[in-house]
Amino acid sequence: MATPPGARSGADTRLRTGAQTILKGARVALPGGVVDNGEVVVEGDRIAANAQENAQVIDVTGHYVVPGFVDIHNHGGGGASFTSGTVEDVLTGIDTHRRHGTTTLVASTVTGDMDFLAQRAGLLSELAEQGDLAGIHFEGPFISPCRKGAHSEELLRDPDPAEVRKLIDAARGQARMVTLATELPGGVDSVRLLAEHGVIAAIGHTDATYEQTVEAIDAGATVATHLFNAMPALGHRAPGPIAALLEDERITVELINDGTHLHPASLQLAFHHAGPDRVAFITDAMDAAGFGDGRYMLGPLEVEVADGVARLVEGGSIAGSTLTLDRAFKRAVTLDGLSVEDAVTALSTTPARLLGMSDSIGSLEPGKYADLVLLDASYDVKGVLRRGVWVVEPHLV
């Protein structure tokens, strides 16, 4: 998506230093539901409770104002990789997703050599410490070779708690999540280690049985990495991990709502059983998100992106997505039949809570960061505000 052009003639959409700004006349997605002809008051980098008489007013009638999107599983975008790129590359990827409404983003790595992953953790943790990222997600190398997807098999390893701890330490307090095949030797012990250190243990790229999945949940796992993908299918005699993950209220399930990773009926099944409070829409994006078709590298593996679908050159496995969360939102409400309220919950509120950040992001409430997305009646992005600064200037024509 190209940056939208400037606002309509005569509409001053610049936020004035030291003054309040009111976004007025929109359909505002508040925690209690969507309010017609609502307003959001911005003061500095926060949402304010009350408007002042001298506040600047921006008329956004005919638009929706929703909380900034929160992506907890993202490998890159804008032609740049979080796994192998430079600091400048990572910032390019972050900016690409911000322009599509993702105001909070966790950077995900893919399977690699342990020393290399520790080095990447150091680089990404610096960006997290300065506020550009919300932390780091390690997807691999502790995953099943039976369900490796777009991960290099020769670099996979069992989840030894000592090696899991090495990655946590390398992240300097910025590790947010580790995806594990918890049925592998050391898997359940690694889940316990992660839980003890306040890091999310996510079950994914797994060949676990139903019973093994229940054991991992009881040990402290709380997330299903891209539910349905890279795990055994739901069976009537061998229900596998999907049934265990959907039925347990302690689990938040990630869903990639791009029309490629999931059949619409699978998404509806997940929402029916888990509900929006336990669903987190993710992108699982790779470099091509917001960039275009072509050849890319995902870790050490070559990927061909054609018609927006990323697949490994060798073997043809789906290799992440080219999704951005604005597209996931639009698809949810226009094709999947979700309400705006439920889509907001799955794109903002639930992932913010999962990250332990719901006191500052995830909903439009006074005191929280002024992170919001301006959408038109067709649910296309017309403005993005992050911490009180326009990332995408409003285009209100």
Image (spheres, grey):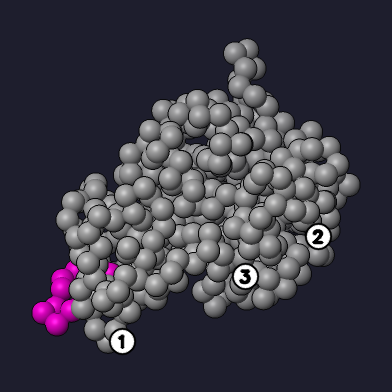
- Type of the residue with mark 2: Met
Give the mark nearer the N terminus: 1 vs 2.
Answer: 1
Quarter-of-image position of residue 313: top right
Q: Residue 124: horizontal and vertical position, in percent? A: 65, 69
Quarter-of-image position of residue 244: top right
Q: Is residue 3 visible?
A: yes
- Assign the magenta stretch its main secondary structure: loop
- Dot 1 and dot 2 residues touching (CB under 8 Å): no
Q: Residues within 10 Å of mark 2 (few under 14, many from 20)?
A: some
- Type of the residue with mark 3: Thr
Badge number at residue 55 = none
**Which one is in front, 71 or 22?**
22
Instruction: Give the magenta part as a residue range.
Output: 47-55
Give the mark nearer the N terminus: 2 vs 3.
Answer: 3
Residue drawn where x is 62% and y is 50% of the image: 322
SS category of the residue bearing label 1: loop
- Type of the residue with mark 1: Thr
SS category of the residue bearing label 3: helix
- The residue singled out by tag 1 in the image is 17
Q: Residues within 10 Å of mark 1 (few under 14, many from 20)?
A: few
Q: Residue 308: horizontal and vertical position, in percent? A: 65, 46
Query: Does residue 370 sit above or below 249 in this rendering?
Result: below
Badge number at residue 114 = 2
- The residue singled out by tag 3 in the image is 92
